[in-house]
Image (cartoon, rainbow, N blue to C red):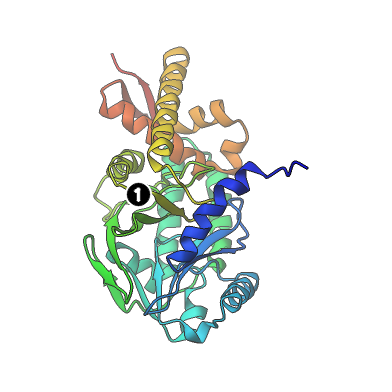
Amino acid sequence: MTVMIDRTQAELAPMFARMESEGIFMFEIPTPFAVGPVNCYLIEDDPLTLIDVGTNSGDALEALENALASRGHKLADLDQIIITHQHIDHGGLIEVVKQRSGAQVACLDRCVPWIEDFQSEASATDRWASKTMQQNGVPEEVAVALRAVAKAFRGWGSSAKVDRVLQEGDVMKFRDRELEIFYRPGHSISDTVFWNADTQTLIAADHLIKHISSNPLLERPPAPDQPRPQELVVYVESLRKTREMSATLTLSGHGEPIADHVSLIDERFALTEKRVEKLYSMLADGGPQSAHELARGTWGNIAVTQAFLTLSEVLGNLDILENAGRVSRSESDDVVKYEVAA
């Protein structure tokens, strides 16, 4: 009798077995977002540590408590909580988890303002995003509507005091391991990865995801008089650094573990190059266009309902083209337009 084994499960089983041998357990916590569940990681070590917590919702809290119980723990057992980056699907439940556990909260220095004062940071970003969308051709009524949606989403976030501020190059010491801190911005301004050199295991959160590309979202500049950060350019450089690491197991913020991060990063580079060339062709064929017009030409009405997301994608590719001197931009009627450089 021949037993058919699902190839995907056969590939995943050794990775999960390795994680268990290292005392790392992945919890899939539901989110209300299209990306689906978020992966939180329990490190059974001293201190007992949870990496990321999920969104601020009853469903997420219940799932987290049940997941901990499956390992014989409860929230009160946690000693330490690490937040990988500022997005609410990873840190939104922090207030409740810290209150119920009494655990110490750690995150990168650039993430601290978001964890300690989420509402203020989110509000400032929403105002900047609305202005940026309109500057790049998104109709005012669409920008206003999306700002209202973003405001409603703030309920999925919360705040808590940060007890340990992490820096690039820091080493977090446990009884049975050390995790080195690396700053890998691009998907967000606070993306942090955690490296165990002894086991060659990388906890990468949303820096690298197997089944979807980590969209480098637009970020407001550190100060009003500074230019917009070029998030895709920054992200590509971060991926180059990660590509050089000798990881044999990479744990993501969503989806499956990754066995071969180098091949996946090379796929991401190829995809970015393809998208850049497509936008260049659209400008060469269609003449000067705003980023929103280019997004509409690429995704149709999705560029309206998800204007900020698609604008992030287009502007990231335009940054690459502009840095290479292949396109130029000008402003007309308060809207920035791009064209093929002379």
Left or right of 40 in this view: 288:
left
Farthest residue to the right: give it.
1
Q: Secondary structure at mark 1?
A: loop
Quadrant in the picture for the N terminus: top right
**Residue 124, position as x, y percentages in the image:** 40, 60
Name the foreground residue: 330 vs 232. 232
Q: Does residue 102 sit above or below 239 in this rendering?
A: below
Question: What is the x, y in percent for residue 321?
Answer: 33, 26
Give the answer, above or below, for where 51 lies relative to 321.
below
Residue 144 visible in rendering = yes
Amino acid at pointer 1 = Ala
In which quarter of the view is residue 236 placed?
Answer: top left
Quadrant assignment, res 135? top left
Q: Residue at x 44, y 16 (%)?
A: 281
Residue 268 rendering spot, x and y as whole percentages: 42, 35
Q: Which residue is mark 1?
A: 247
Residue 331 versus residue 238 in the image, above or below: above
Q: Residues within 10 Å of mark 1 (few under 14, many from 20)?
A: many
Residue 254 appears in the picture as rendered: no
Compared with 266, 204 (above or below) is below
Left or right? Give the position of 68 relative to 164: right
Quarter of the image with the C terminus is: top left
Identity of the residue furthest to the front in this view: 1
- How many numbered circles does the render carry? 1
Find residue 214 and report its horizontal and vertical position in percent.
Answer: 46, 45
Q: Write the residue at 54% across / 43% down.
A: 211
In the image as oriented, which residue stretches furthest toward the left?
169
